[in-house]
Amino acid sequence: MNQDDLREVPGRIFGAVSRYVQGGEENIRLLTVALLSGGHVLLEGYVGTGKTLLARSFAQAIGGEFKRIQLVPDMLPGDVTGFNLYQPDGSSRFMPGPIFANIVLADELNRTTPRTQAAFLEAMQEACVTVEGTTYPLPKPFLAVATQLPVGGEGTYAIPEGGMDRFLLRLWSGYPEKEAETRILESADILENPTVEPVTTPQAVLSLQGLVRAVEVSDLTIQYVLDLVERLRRDEDVASGPSPRASLALYRASRALAFLEERDFVLPDDVRRLVIPALEHRLRLTAEAEIDGVTPRQIVERTLETVPVPKGMP
C-alpha cells in the first residue's frame, strides 16, 4: 500500500463501523485515534448502550485476529494469559490464552477481581505476557478495548489506579439521541448478528502507525501539554494527578488526531479535544472534593479555561 492508499484507511474504518453503530461517531473516531497511537481504550457506559457492539464492529473492520473475553468474578489470570499444559512424561507446552490476538475485547472488565484485571497490565504496557517466568510476545498491532459498567454497580470491582493509567483514552457510551435510536430500531434485524467486513490488514495498521509518528509536534505544543498536566497536578482538589504516562498519552493521541485531520502537524485544538478522554480518568480527588461533589471532568474543564495557549501557536 502506498501512502495515499494508507491515508484512506481511517475513513473506510469509520464507514464500515458507523453502518452498525448509530450515534457513536465520536467514539469511532477516538477508537481510531487509539489504534493509530498504539494505545488502548476503556469504554464505559450503561448496560445496553452498544459498548460491545462498537468494540466488536471496530475490531472486525480492522482485520487480523479478534478475541472477546467475557470477564466474570471467578475468572483466573491464566484464563486470560494462557497456561502451561503438563504431560505425564514431565514435558509441557504453552497454551496461549485469548489475550493473544490483534484486537482483544475485554468485556465488562470491572466484573472480575483485581487479580485477574492485573493480567492485562503487562500485555497493555509491554505487548507481551509472562507465564511461569517465560515471556511471550503478543501479535502486532495489539489493541485492547475494555468495557466497564459504571463504577459502584452491583457485582463490580473498581479498576486500580495503575490499571486505569494504562488506558490511552476513556470513552463514554451514553444513551443515543431519539433519531439515532430510531435508526437502531429500523436496523434491528441486521444488529442481531452484525458482521463487518475487514477494510484493512494488520500490516497496513502498522504502516499507518509509522506515518503518525512522523507528525510534527512543535516545542510550543509540547509545552502546552506539560502546562495542562502540571496545572492538574497542582489543583487543590486533586490528590493524585496525571503521571508522565498521561503526558505521553495526550502527546501521542494528538498526533493521531492531527493525522486523521489530514495534517502533518499538531494544533492546540487537537490537544484540547483530547484532554478529557486522555486525562479525566487519571485524576484521583481529595476526600473534601468528593464530599463537595466535585468531579474530575469539572477540574479538567476549568484547567482548559485557565491554562493559556502559548503565544506563537497557530
Image: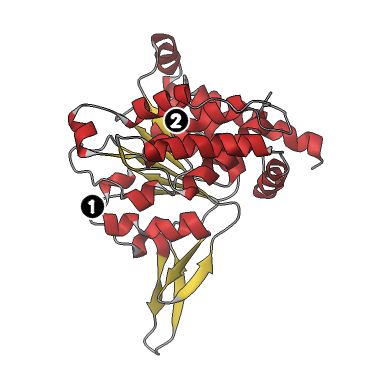
Q: Residue at x 31, y 50 (%)?
A: 160
Q: Residue at x 69, y 45 (%)?
A: 213
In the image, farthest residue toward the bottom: 89
Instruction: Indicate which label's residue lies in the foreground, 2 or 1.
Output: 2
* Of residues 61 and 305, the one drawn nearer to the viewer in this rendering: 305
Residue 166, x across and y down, in percent: 44, 49
Distance Cα–Cα, label 2 vs label 1: 30 Å
Q: Which residue is mark 1?
A: 73
Dot 2: element:
helix
Dots 2, 1 in contact, CB < 8 A? no
* Of residues 27 and 254, the one drawn nearer to the viewer in this rendering: 254
In the image, farthest residue toward the top: 179
Residue 55, x across and y down, in percent: 46, 37
The answer to whether residue 296 is seen in the rendering is yes
Amino acid type shown at disc 1: Pro
Residue 1, x across and y down, in percent: 79, 43
Q: Which mark is residue 276?
A: 2
Q: Quadrant of residue 53?
A: top left
* Mark 1 neighbour density, 10 Å: few (under 14) some (14–19) many (20 or more): some
Amino acid type shown at disc 2: Ile
Horizontal side of 144 relative to 83 (left or right) equals: right
Q: Quadrant of residue 146?
A: top left
- Say which quadrant the C terminus sits in: top right
Dot 1: element:
loop
Residue 293, placed above or below residue 167: above
